[in-house]
Image (spheres, rainbow, N blue to C red):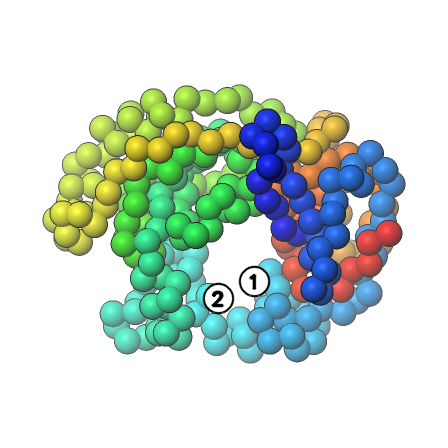
Amino acid sequence: MVATLPASQDASVVYHLRAGEQQVPLNARIGTPISLEWSGAIACTHCGRATRKSFAQGYCYPCFKRLAQCDTCIMKPETCHFFQGTCREPEWGEKHCFQPHIVYLANSSGLKVGITRKTQMPTRWLDQGAIQALPILEVNTRQQSGLVEMLFKEQVSDRTNWRAMLKGEVEALDLVSERDRLLALLEGGLNQLRELHGSDAIRPLDEKPRSFQYPVEVFPRKVVSHNFDKQARVDGVLQGIKGQYLILDTGVINLRKFTGYEVTLT
Ligand SMILES: [Zn+2]
């Protein structure tokens, strides 16, 4: 599922379903019955090979074991091992990890910290169902972003409570004052990182907070999940879309989890 920003600021995030070369618009389907049916086939999103099971949300087992993008250092960037000469794909690493990264604050189910490649904004926030986001620091590499995030995690979560996010029970926050509070609190640790990585390695940003609205007509009161692995067919009235979730009157489904699954939408 592809999420993009609306043309005007007070409109909702625009969702499409990727179907080969085509993109099927989803927002217009809200309020109507839909059904999704998985054929039983899964194609690796990297190499296209058929796989019986999906690893790391869309890869076949050989790709999962071989690709740098499936290595544990992607989830824990502070454990980057490029300099030990053990990066699975050094060229991929140079292209993706040795690029400017952003440390941000977001409000998905409350205050959280996160990191992303500069080019992945705002996609990352929309994928998390964040209603607000504020980039606060820019660093030179993915590893540095991980080190900064570790520091912030002493004070603030890096997780989204997806049930709370889906229920829409999220109060707006003053992200600018949260930023100022956290930067003051963590100044010592940030300066230590600057001593190790260069005085201009971690640069404060002075950006405006952004806010996002999602096309949801009815928020679920109780969150029940559909799962293609247990039931290949999912039916219900589409009541909204938030993050990577379709919200149906019969339950929610995380489409990211089923990347690579061959699904028919009717
Ligand atoms: Zn593969």
Who is closer to the viewer here, 91 or 74?
91
Q: Secondary structure at mark 1?
A: loop
Contact flag, marks 1 and 2 (Cβ < 8 Å): yes
Camera-side residue of 28 and 195: 28
Checking the image for residue 180, the label placed there is none
Quadrant housing residue 128: top right
Task: Give the residue number, with chain letter if any, for mark 1.
Answer: 56
Amino acid bearing label 2: Cys
Local crowd size for mark 1, using a 10 Å CA cut-off: few (<14), some (14–19), many (≥20)? some
Residue 154 visible somewhere in the drawing: no
Towards the viewer: 106 or 147 = 106
Gap between marks 1 and 2 measured at Cα: 7 Å
* Count of picture labels: 2
Horizontally, is 121 left or right of 259 in the view? left
Residue 149 position, x and y percent, is: 33, 45
Residue 21 on image: x %, y %: 70, 64
Q: Residue furthest front?
A: 7
The residue tagged 2 is: 70
Instruction: Quadrant for residue 30, please give it.
Output: top right
Give residue 35's position: percent from left, percent from top: 85, 49
| Disc 1 CB within 8 Å of nearest ligand 1 atom | no
Q: Is residue 105 visible in the rendered structure shown here?
A: yes
- Seen in the picture, residue 70 relative to 203 is either above or below; the reply is below
Give the side of residue 239 with respect to residue 209, left or right: right
Q: Amino acid at mark 1?
A: Ala
Residue 80 falls in image quadrant:
bottom left
